[in-house]
Image (spheres, rainbow, N blue to C red):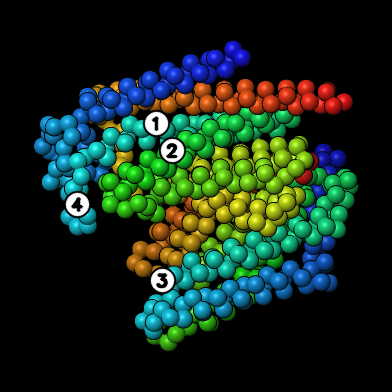
Amino acid sequence: MKQLKIAVVLVLIGGVLTTVAFLMAFYTAEVQQFGTVTFDAPIETVFPVAPDQLQPAEGIAYVRPWFSQKIFYFHVPVAEASFLVLIISAIFAVRFLMTKRAEYDTKSRIAMETSLVFVVLTMITGVLWTKASWGVWWEWEPRLTTYFIMMLMMIAYFVLRNSIEEEERRATYAAVFAILAAINAPLSFMITRVIPSNHPVVFQPGMASSNLMPFIVAQIGMLMIGYGIYVSRMSEERLRERVEIAKETLEG
Amino acid sequence: MARERTSNMSSWRQFKAILKKDIVMELRTKEMLTSMGLYALLVLVVYYITLSQAGADFEVRRIAAGLLWLVFIFTSLLGLNRSLVHEKDQGCLDALLISPTDRPVIFFGKAVGNLIFLLIVEVMIVPLFFFIFLSRPGAASGGPMWMLALALLVGSIGIAGVGTLLATMSVNTKGKDFILAVLFIPIMFPLLLAVVAASAAVLQADPGYVNTYWQMMGIAAGYDAVMLLAAFALYEFVLGA
């Protein structure tokens, strides 16, 4: 129960931090020159329409207020959290294969669930940004493709789990697949990187601290929320196990 | 020293025995090759149907590499599933587990068997594919054939190796072939992207294609190395469960 309290507190703090980061993104962060785009004139206003230098030579022009950039402060922390949690899940999977203790299987599964939540959030924010910034909902662009594949692997993980009834076999196969997925994610990241991409690379030398601050705050907040989700799901699992045991004792 | 030598010899013999078992069974029933070959032929017919309205000036060569790999992806899914379903239905996998065979040997035996069947299907299908789709007089010709063959080989090694692991898992589930597809395609994604890019470079032979080809082959080989190692290490756990 103590853990559950910690989880609730973490989710609350995380929520506050993300909200703060959200406000900072709108009120203190400068509009930034992103990745492939270069322009000289500074941009003064808080909610500008994208300047002329950024209008693409052909295709759809940026007609909306340049809100789309603000999604960065949410999108990137979520995406990074998802990668981190996937790796944690794989580490638990390795631990399970080494020890064969059911507790690591549960931990690995819950971590994978948490990661899937983040992946879905990243996909939603990413698609919104793509529409706002590139004028299309989806493009088979390296970063998007990689992420899509990662989501498919996580869904496959749960499909695999659901189709096996024996507990130990399910745990082992799931652990093996989680490890394969964690090895595969960087590989598909690498292969798609070889193809030239127009996904912005945001972290460059000379990034303004007013941009960096909300990002870091959002990242910490997001990790706290992630840990909170993980811990509360874990304690839910533990409670369920206790209920199962209690049921069995009553029946027996 | 002498003892190590005998154990090496016996692993090699075990490997040969498992491989021989698969090949002898195939020679008797001819089931894998007929089903995979026929399936591949049917996919070619489906290609004809899908491309039939594309018009006379449509250059099939631009998408030929993708089409070629599509046949082999579907065919290998079928083949991998069948090869492991046999093992399971006839209780052969259990028997292998009881016998004093090293687990890695089982993995290599099955993977090499699958690789051989896949390669045989490729040898049959590739000339036919060229004959049906790419032999139009006056059409542009591609790069040297050995480059395509190398791309097919490297791709098939990855498919057979990692596919054997995934198929061993999927035959023990409720969904069997469906589960295999769900697991196989995302895991194979980097390899398939790389080998399709390499094959397309050869088939289209645009200027500077040799560089693209070797770059993509490097990635494919890297994938094979990393993922085969992982599959090899994890196979023991899958068999044990």
Disc 4 versus disc 1: nearer the observer: 4
Disc 1 versus disc 3: nearer the observer: 1
Q: CA distance from mark 1 to mark 3?
A: 40 Å
Q: Is residue B225 visible?
A: no
Asked whether the beta carbons under mark 2 and mark 3 sit within 8 Å of each other, the answer is no
Question: Tag 1: residue type?
Answer: Pro
Q: What is the chain letter for disc 3?
A: B
Is disc 3 on the same chain as disc 1? no
Q: Secondary structure at mark 3?
A: helix
Is disc 3 on the same chain as disc 2? no
What's the residue at 65%, 56% (across, down)? B178
In this rendering, would A44 be left or right of A79? Answer: left
Q: CA distance from mark 2 to mark 4?
A: 27 Å
Disc 2 versus disc 3: nearer the observer: 2
The residue pinned by badge 2 equals A121
Q: Look at the image and tell me in which quarter the N terminus of chain B lies.
A: top right
Question: Tag 4: residue type?
Answer: Ala
Q: CA distance from mark 3 to mark 4?
A: 31 Å
**Above/below status of B90 relative to A158:** below
Q: CA distance from mark 2 to mark 3?
A: 36 Å
The residue pinned by badge 4 equals A61
Would you call the spot at circle 3 few (<14 residues within 10 Å), some (14-19), or many (20 or more)?
few
Question: Tag 3: residue type?
Answer: Arg
The residue pinned by badge 3 equals B62
Q: What is the chain letter for disc 1?
A: A
Q: Is residue B138 visible?
A: yes
What's the residue at 44%, 19% (across, down)? A12
In this rendering, would A234 be left or right of A165? Answer: left
- Mark 2 or mark 1, earlier in chain: 1
Residue B216 appears at what percent x and percent y?
46, 56
